[in-house]
Image (cartoon, rainbow, N blue to C red):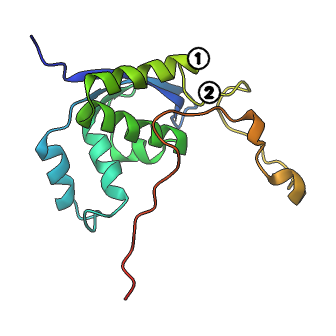
Amino acid sequence: MTLRTRYEFTLPRGYVDRDGAVHRDGVMRLATARDELEPLRDPTVTGPDDPRLTIVVLARVVESLGTLPQVTPHEIEGLFAADLAYLQDFYGVINFGTAEEFAQFVAAQQELGGVPGDVPGPAPGPVPDEPARPAESAAPDQANRLPRPGRAAIEEIPTEVR
């Protein structure tokens, strides 16, 4: 029996590089203890509760993303929120979940058409400035949202009150 250490994924939206190319398919490897400890030495990370820690860890374990020559914190910071949340969920499932939980995660993605959160519409890319909309039309249309497995809501980091 061999241990699987690399997992392919497809981002819901995709990373858009400076040339406008969209990168959605990638590979994430299992994290090592070093992958979780070394970022704490990064001068841009202030501690274990710093949200930047997630960015630095993901940049270490995402081995490839589309045709990018390298995945750095810069690329992870440039992800859409849905893609960052997806990678966080994916990281959790492959590193801390069981084989059954991984299978459920993959099945949930396939149930949503293979790409979680993908909504029909124009291809990602630069969008021209639009005039401001009235307040009543600014609310997102809840009926058009697709459910996304693995995360019901964005977690809040508790802060100490002094």
Q: Which element is circle 1 on?
A: loop
Give the mark nearest the N terminus, 1 or 2: 1
Kindly identify which residue carries mark 2. 118
Let me know if residue 66 appears in the view.
no
Residue to which mark 1 is pinned = 113
Q: Quadrant of residue 76?
A: top left
Tell me the residue at 38%/24% (across/down): 26
Q: Quadrant of the N terminus?
A: top left
Is residue 98 rendered to the left or right of residue 65? left
The mark total stands at 2
In the image, 146: left or right of 32?
right
Determine crowd level at label 1: few under 14, some 14-19, many 20+ residues with C-alpha closer than 10 A. few
Q: CA distance from mark 1 to mark 2?
A: 8 Å
| Disc 1 and disc 2 in contact, CB within 8 angstroms | yes
1 or 2: mark nearer the eye:
1
**Label 2 Cα neighbours within 10 Å, binned few <14 / some 14-19 / many ≥20:** some
Look at the image and tell me in which quarter the C terminus lies: bottom left
**In this view, which residue lies farthest toward the left?**
1
Quadrant of the rendered structure where residue 20 is?
A: top right
Which label sits on residue 83?
none
Viewer-nearest residue: 155 or 51 = 155
Amino acid type, residue under disc 2 in the picture: Asp
Q: Nearer the viewer, residue 162 or 15?
A: 162
Residue 6, above or below 146:
above
Q: Is residue 107 visible?
A: yes
Q: Which residue is depicted at the point 33% across and 51% down? A: 54
In the image, residue 66 lies at what x, y percent? 42, 23
